[in-house]
Image: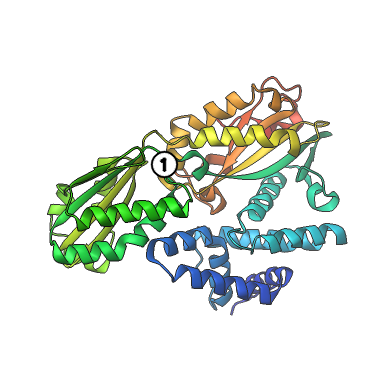
Amino acid sequence: MTAIEQPAHRVIASFIACIGPKNWSARMAEIAGQAALSQRVGRALVQMHAIEITIERLRRTANLSNLSMADCSVLALVGEAVATDAALSAAGRARFRAALAASLRQEATLVPVFHLLRTAALQRSRGFDVYHAGFEEGAAFDLLLTRNEAEAELSCDVVSAEDGRDVHRSSWARLVDGIDADLQTWLSAHPGRYLLKLTLPQGLARDSAQLAALQGRIKTMLHEQRRADHDEACVLRLDPLMLAAAQAGEPEELRHSREAPKLMQSLRREFGHEAHLAVTSKGDGLFVLAARAAREDEVAVAIRRRLAAIAPTRLSGTRPGILAMFVEDTDRTEWRLLRERLELEGEARQFLTFPEARGVVAVTCASRLELFGGTAPDAALDGELRFRNPSHPAAKAAGLAPAVSSSI
């Protein structure tokens, strides 16, 4: 282990010490156990806990001389966590460690804490003095920024893109995992290539009864060899799969990878970025499921609603306020389109006209792409999107400019 690698391992060890080694080991065992239970839900869990899994992998890696950008970004935030823990008062440290502990329970992740740490580091890099008012004093806001005698309160929050989808990606994964074995059995008896299109006017949320009912309808439809089934909850239609990629002889590839990249790319082009897709194969048989809600996703609208909900409670109103939003559960394509289509800008600027935004001088948005050190065009330049409130009295304050000036 080189002299450069030793501090990295020591930083990771110090971070785990803040959490408690037994707590950390138990959490990693829990994630591994849950991820092994099913194929698609397991992949989603691995993605959801990418920070924790990266830290554990780095902890176990002897040679840290050739790290990816994502690894370096996570390691830097681990160092930020250790430095923050050391700099806080006893009361602040207790609140900070309580936040870390909460991130290891049930469906929680380290994302909220790391979003806060990354935001603090980002503002310091812009010349601000950063005080952890939330940890030190239990303030409603997280950070107090000071620069050239100008002050601003900053509150960090996490909003899930699932809140803007009628069909939740997590529920879709559970649905497909629940019928995958039945689809393989059906393909054994009915060799060929099939497409089952699902339109879900009532959506598909995290409702076990709804999932079970839809799984049952699909199984019954196949068992009775019907081509269609519909009611107010869903419309199902089974057709031959006619995509060119599916006719190009990919079953051998699919034997080794259930979701061949070429086929998935063709499906995405055919059904659009909002469609929910899954592929099951058995021998030379292929079964594709493609689902859509009855209306377009409204991820940016969900973010605007979250802004309006937290603004009155997460800022004191005595200083200019910044709301730093982390948009979770979004992928590379969706995040880029939200920016390119100006959907985020439109909803953020609409929020800034609301009475709830009277004390808000700026709104910022970031995703995992920025947190993991992504670059344009996938990630936003400068590490976040910023939208300034032109009607706020402090909007043109020179001291606050690096934190509030619009990035678009």
Tell me if residue 388 comes above or below residue 70 in the rendering. Answer: above
Q: Is residue 368 left or right of residue 223?
A: right
* x and y percentages locating residue 316 in the rendered image: 81, 35
Out of 279 and 66, give the one closest to the viewer: 279
Name the quadrant containing residue 152.
top right
Taking the image as drawn, is residue 86 in sight? yes
Image quarter hosting the C terminus: top right
The amino acid sitting under disc 1 is Gly
Q: How is the image coloured?
A: rainbow
* Position of residue 328 in the picture relative to residue 86 (left or right): left
Q: Residue at x 62, y 75 (%)?
A: 25
Residue 273 in view in this figure: no
Task: Please state, as top left, top right, bottom left or bottom right, where the N terminus lies in the image.
Answer: bottom right
Query: In this image, 114 relative to 208: left or right?
Result: right
Toward the viewer: 386 or 240?
A: 240
Q: Is residue 197 above or below residue 71?
A: above
Classify 78 as above or below 387. Answer: below
Residue under label 1: 203
Residue 313 is situated, as x and y percent measured from the top left of the image, at 75, 37
Judged from the image, the secondary structure of the residue bearing numbered disc 1 is: loop
Q: Residue at x 64, y 72 (%)?
A: 24
